[in-house]
């Protein structure tokens, strides 16, 4: 892998010079290490031929510490009458050109994501990436209920993109259930981590409230300080005077911790 920095904003008043941090994947075998360093896939530019990752406040479930919460059990009880079947299929064995699959994804994009945020052209680009390796297909008595595009490698799963029948969203909390079901599948199959994307802004709090065993990448380590994470999410939209290090009260204590 190759890590590189791209200059961003400049604020000379408090000596803050922002850089976006990227990782260029050179081989598929690097996937676990890339995710372990806090990187997530970047697919915002369809002209990029290689697999690029960006450094962010990534969220993961450490499966050794994962157990079902009361909310997980409540949602599972809602879904149980549907008798959902899960099939985990290698991407190369799944017909990505199946009109049923394409129409299902298009319907979800139109209803939940918005065509401005996710065009079908971008979705096809994402499907073409080597990063996504498996399709998690959810069905009930032959009726398709949802799909997850996952990145599965050694002992990790990245819950990357999910599409589901929005008819069941309010009555069965189907989206929340699919995330829990994927985590439960990973634990039952001996994986070590499930990556859940970023944890920014209040909209990410549902991931944090619903699951045990969480940790987030804070720029130098995976932290289990979930109360701090909630605070960060709640204040992400507020303007900041400087970066977190400059605003720390005990900078020397932090530096000592780094050297320990």
Image: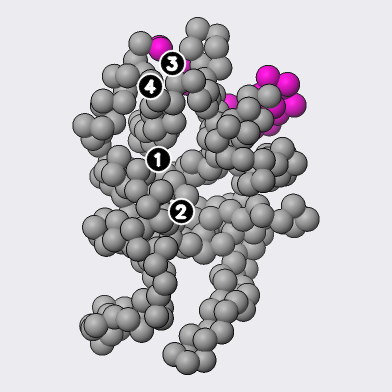
The numbered dot on residue 172 is 4
Q: What's the distance in space between the residues labelled 3 and 4, CA to CA?
A: 12 Å
Out of 243 and 66, give the one closest to the viewer: 243
Q: What's the distance in space between the residues labelled 1 and 4, CA to CA?
A: 27 Å
Residue at the spot of label 2: 198
Q: Residues within 10 Å of mark 4 (few under 14, many from 20)?
A: many
Residue at (43% x, 16% y) in the render:
84
Q: What's the distance in space between the residues labelled 2 and 3, CA to CA?
A: 28 Å
| Mark 2 or mark 4: whose residue is earlier in sequence | 4
The numbered dot on residue 84 is 3
Residue at (42% x, 63% y) in the render:
237
Please state which of the two labelled residues, at mark 2 or mark 4, is closer to the viewer. 4
Tell whether label 3 touches label 2 (CB within 8 Å): no
Whether residue 88 is visible:
no
Q: Tell me if residue 98 comes above or below residue 5 in the rendering.
A: above
Q: What's the distance in space between the residues labelled 2 and 4, CA to CA?
A: 25 Å
Part of the protein shown in magenta: 82-102
Q: Tell me if residue 3 comes above or below residue 203 in the rendering.
A: below
Q: How many marks?
A: 4
Residue at (35% x, 11% y) in the render:
81
Say which quadrant the N terminus sits in.
bottom right
Q: What's the distance in space between the residues labelled 3 and 1, CA to CA?
A: 22 Å
Out of 221 and 18, give the one closest to the viewer: 18
Single out the residue that lies furthest toward the top: 141
Q: Is residue 176 left or right of residue 13?
A: left
* Coordinates of residue 162 in the picture (x, y in percent): 53, 35
The numbered dot on residue 191 is 1
| Mark 1 or mark 4: whose residue is earlier in sequence | 4
Instruction: Give the quadrant of residue 111.
Output: top right
């Amino acid at each position: 892998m190759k890590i590189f920095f791209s200059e961003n904003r400049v604020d000379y008043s408090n000596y803050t010079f922002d850089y976006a941090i990227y990782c260029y994947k050179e081989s598929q075998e690097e996937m676990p290490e890339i995710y372990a360093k806090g990187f997530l896939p970047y697919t915002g530019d369809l002209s990029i031929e290689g697999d690029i990752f960006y450094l962010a406040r990534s969220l993961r479930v450490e499966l050794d510490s994962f157990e079902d919460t009361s909310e997980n059990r409540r949602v599972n009880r809602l879904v149980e009458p549907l008798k959902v079947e899960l099939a985990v299929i290698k991407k190369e064995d799944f017909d990505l050109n199946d009109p049923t699959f394409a129409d299902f994804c298009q319907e979800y994009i139109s209803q939940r994501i918005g065509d401005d945020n996710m065009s079908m052209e971008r979705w096809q680009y994402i499907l073409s990436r080597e990063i996504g390796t498996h399709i998690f297909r959810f069905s009930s008595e032959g009726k398709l209920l949802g799909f997850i595009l996952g990145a599965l490698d050694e002992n990790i799963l990245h819950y990357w993109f999910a599409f589901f029948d929005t008819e069941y969203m309010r009555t069965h909390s189907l989206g929340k259930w699919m995330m829990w079901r994927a985590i439960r599948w990973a634990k039952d199959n001996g994986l070590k981590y499930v990556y859940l994307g970023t944890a920014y802004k209040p909209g990410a709090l549902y991931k944090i409230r619903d699951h045990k065993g969480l940790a987030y990448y804070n720029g130098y380590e995976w932290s289990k300080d979930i109360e701090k994470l909630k605070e960060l999410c709640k204040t992400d939209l507020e303007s900041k005077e400087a970066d977190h290090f400059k605003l720390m009260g005990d900078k020397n204590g932090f530096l000592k911790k780094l050297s320990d």
